[in-house]
Each structure stands twice: as structure tokens, then as C-alpha cells.
Amino acid sequence: MVTIKDVAKATGVSPSTVSRVIADNPRISLDTKKKVRKAMKNLGYHPNVNARNLVAKSTKAIGVIMPSSADKALQNPFFPEILRGIGSVTHDMQYSLTLSTGETDEEILDEVQRMVYGSYVDGVILLYSRLNDSVMNFLMEKSFPFVIVGKPYDYISEITHVDNDNFSAGKEITNHLIKQGHKKIAFIGGSRDLFVTMDREAGYEAAMKEAGLSYPESYKIHAEFLKSGGRDAVSQLFALSEQPTGIVVSDDLMSLGVLSTLEESGFSVPKDISLVSFNNVYLSEITRPALTTVDVRIYELGAQSAKALIEKTTNKSEPAKRIIIPYDIVYRGSVSKKS
């Protein structure tokens, strides 16, 4: 078995320095932390979780894992709002939050492994669900308590998750455009490996098929859930010879990029192009025009995920459950009838 002394020997530091790195002591330099953590990973060393648990059965802390770097994710108002919902529950229950800050998938997995092996948190909330996610696979393998905001790609009956019915929402918001006379309707979504994108896109496709409307592959664009992602996506759409008259955008911040790009290109919303969106963040009310959008109740998604996780950490026999948060469509001024 690899010990702290082995890590110390491999890195040329003292065992006490290795212990301080494990505890994330701020007095240890970043270079030393990187060197020691790399050696720990290469040697397969992990802190003794059981020994730490003998000292404290609960850390009264939960980890919150972002879908990408915190720097990017927190640019989208969805994430501060869901954190507000999580924080409302953890505050009342006197729990603290540890937020992932990794820039890459590998760094985020490394952070989660340290949370688990170091016994720094009682459980973890994943603020996303994607195909073949290494973080989810690791948590399943270790039987560590976690909750997903979204729909798991596998083991659905075994994983507690909090979600909206994104398929129905995607279908209903697309039907709103169809009822207004639009036939050429495009879809702008996030990454193809995110289940929220898959479900909303599947709902869009179902509505189009039921209405007997075609949707070429070129009408489906995928980009980051950022304003820049919306700008890039709509630029691709309007480079096509046959342009859409309506667009379903899977995120309000992306819609902001779509709106600004259309305005710069001389298009008027909703006179020339109708636009519907998702999430109902505060930005959707102050855009010009204000956005017709699906209110997914972000705060409630966060609050329910925190409640579910704390239940799992305090009661190990708590069965897995699926919690569906109802959605509403907020009708504003971004859609007009197509004559």
C-alpha cells in the first residue's frame, strides 16, 4: 500500500508537507501542491477516508460540480440562480458548499476524487448530465452519495435526479411557433452530449414531425450555453440560402447573442424573425423585445437537489427517486404571427 512517506520520497518534500497538501493548506505553494498531487495520482495514493471518518462522521459540506469551468459556467445566469436555490437549503441545514473550479474535464474529475478520497464532503450535486461522464461513473463506482440536476444517461432507476420534462417543454414551445404560422423553424442547442439538449431537441423534432414540417440538419446548430454561442449559431443559420422564420433557442443567454446578432444584421424580432427560448432568467425580461421562454424554475431545481442529497447523506437507505419540477411558458414579445 502506498503511504504518505512514499509520496514525500517521490517529490522530495517532507511527509508533513504532503499532509498539508492533502488538507489544501493555503501556506503551501501552488507549484508544490501540483507536484505532490501529480505524484499522488501517479502512485495511486489516496488519503485514508475511513480514518478521517472516525474523527467526524459528517463534514456538513456538499460538493457542487459545474458542467465546465466555473469561469465559463458562471457567466450564464442559470448557474448563479441554481446555486441560490441550493444555498437556501444548505444555509437552513447549516451545511457549507464546495464548488468545482477545474478548467478541464480531467481537472474536474481530479477535484471530485479529492473531495471523495479526502472525505471533504458528504455528497455531491452534479449540475449537468452528459453521455459517458467520467465523474458520474466514478461516483457510481465508489457508491458515493450524489444527485444529478438533469436526466442520467444510464442507471436511471438507481440515481436520484431532479429535472424538468424537457421533451414536453421543447415540443410545446415549438408548437407555439407552429401555431403562429411558422414553418421554417430552426433549433439552437448546447453540446450534443448534454441530455438537456437531447431532450429539448427531441421535443422540437416531434412537434415538427407531427405538424408535417421538415427540418434539415442545417437547421440544428449546437454551441456553448453562452452569448457567444448564440452569436455563432445564428450566424451559421443566416448563411444558409433558405433561412428560418422562427428559432427555438435552448438557453436565454444564447438568445441574447442571437438577438444582438440579428439586430446587427438588420433583422427585426419579432417582425422578421420569431424567437422562443428556455430558462426564464432575469435577462429574458429586459431584452428588447422581452423573450417568450420556458420557465424551468431554476431556483426550485437547486433547492430540491440539495434537499434530496442531504436526505441521501443522512439516511443511507434512502431509495433513488426522480423529482420532476413543473415548467411554465412565459409569453412575451419575441413571437409574431407569420402571414
Image: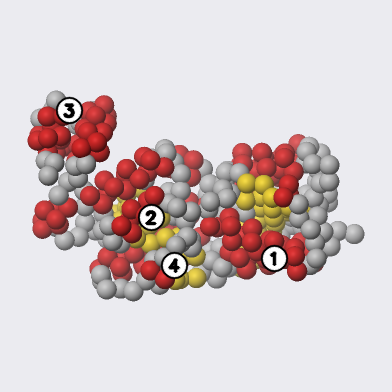
Residue at 22% in and 49% down: 117
Mark 3 vs 1, N-terminal side: 3
Compute the Cα span from label 3 to label 4.
Answer: 42 Å
Mark 1 vs 4, N-terminal side: 4
Q: Amino acid at mark 1?
A: Ala
Q: Which residue is mark 3?
A: 11
Q: Nearer the viewer, residue 207 or 16?
A: 207
Mark 3 vs 2, N-terminal side: 3
Q: Is residue 291 visible?
A: no
Q: Are marks 2 and 1 in contact (CB under 8 Å)?
A: no
Label 2 residue SS: helix
Label 3 residue SS: helix
Q: Are marks 3 and 4 in contact (CB under 8 Å)?
A: no
Q: Where is residue 248 drawn, in percent x and y? A: 69, 55
Q: Amino acid at mark 3?
A: Thr
Mark 3 vs 4, N-terminal side: 3
Question: In the displayed structure, does residue 161 sit left or right of residue 143?
Answer: right
Residue at 81% in and 52% down: 245
Q: Mark 3: give few (<14), some (14-19) or many (20+) Cα within 10 Å.
A: some
Q: Amino acid at mark 4?
A: Ile
In the image, residue 233 above or below residue 32: below
Q: Mark 1: give few (<14), some (14-19) or many (20+) Cα within 10 Å.
A: many
Q: Which residue is mark 4?
A: 156
Q: Where is residue 158 drawn, in percent x and y? A: 38, 68
Question: In the displayed structure, does residue 272 sit left or right of residue 331?
Answer: right
